[in-house]
Image (spheres, helix red, strand yellow):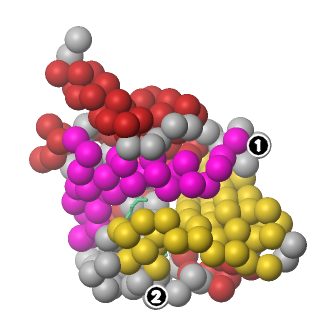
Amino acid sequence: MSHDEARKIRLIMSLRGRGITDRAVLGALERVPREMFVDPAFLDQAWEDRALPIAAGQTVSQPFIVAFMTQALELTDRTKVLEIGTGSGYQAAVLARIARRVYTVERHPELLQVAEKRFATLKLHNLHSRHGDGWKGWAEQAPFEAIIVTAAASEPPAALLDQLAEGGRMVAPIGGSSDVQRLVRYRRRDGAIEEERLLDVRFVPLVRGAARASESH
Ligand code: SAH
């Protein structure tokens, strides 16, 4: 067994020990090659349970948080999912291994380009990505049964709640750029929005507006 393979197994087992019980989620984390999504300088840490820096001052979340948020979305192979904040593309690839269709929006064109190359290499044909402002969601493809926001907003973006289907779940870190944010699950039930606090987390902020090429923050 390679060193990486042993680390991967150790990581998956530790996720199980921390309440990740959804087998589809564990299976997706096992199958998506995280080493393909990290900066080469951090390759040796690809299978550690750590957030790692990516380009444009952003980060790829730690595997536990990816698994926890994915599990909280309650996905099946029939679910249509929207992700806000493509970043490295890792979370999107995990979603694409479980759900029917995944749409992901990123404000940094450079990050998006690199992520799209990875999606092509992995032949993730049920994954669609575009450059844009995640605060606005992806109206043309709404409604979504699941929405995941991977950057912290000061409040749940109204456009995203509007694009949530009846019975749909949205998982988002709320708290803007403050030190502690809370991960919240919203659920649309009989038209109304229910709210459930899940965990304390730390994410980069959900910035307003799409960045132009070569803007570095
Ligand atoms: N899901 C990513 C994590 C990326 S970090 C992964 O698996 O790697 C958060 C991402 O959100 C960053 O790439 C950042 O550029 C992006 N982001 C921040 N504000 C945004 C906005 N308004 N619209 C779209 N993307 C945004």
Q: Which residue is mark 1?
A: 78
Is residue 214 covered in magenta?
Answer: no
Please say whether residue 62 is one of the residues in the magenta stretch. yes
- Distance from disc 1 to disc 2, alpha carbons, whole Å, reads 31 Å
Q: Residue at x 38, y 77 (%)?
A: 181
The amino acid type, in three-letter code, at marker 2 is Ser
Q: How many marks?
A: 2
Residue 128 visible? The answer is: no
Does the image show residue 92?
A: yes
- On the image, the x and y values in percent for residue 114 come to 37, 53
| Disc marking residue 154 | 2
Q: Quadrant of residue 30?
A: top left
From the viewer's perspective, tell me whether residue 60 is left or right of residue 166: left
* Residue found at x 41% / y 84%: 175
Q: Position of residue 44 (x, y in %)?
A: 14, 37
- Residue drawn at the location 65% of the way across and 85% of the way down: 158
Q: Quadrant of ligand 1?
A: bottom left
Residue interval drawn in magenta: 48-76
Marking on residue 51: none
From the viewer's perspective, is 130 left or right of 62?
Answer: right
In the rendered view of the protein, which quadrant contains the N terminus? top left
Callout 2: helix, strand or loop? loop
Q: From the viewer's perspective, is residue 15 above or below residue 212?
A: above
- Please give left or right for residue 48 compared with residue 97 in the image: left
Q: Is mark 2 within 8 Å of ligand 1?
A: no
Say what amino acid the circle numbered 1 marks. Arg
Q: Hey, which quadrant is residue 6 in on the image?
A: top left
Q: Position of residue 194 (x, y in %)?
A: 70, 75
Q: Residue at x 70, y 68 (%)?
A: 187
Percent position of residue 113, x then y: 42, 57
Q: Secondary structure at mark 1?
A: loop
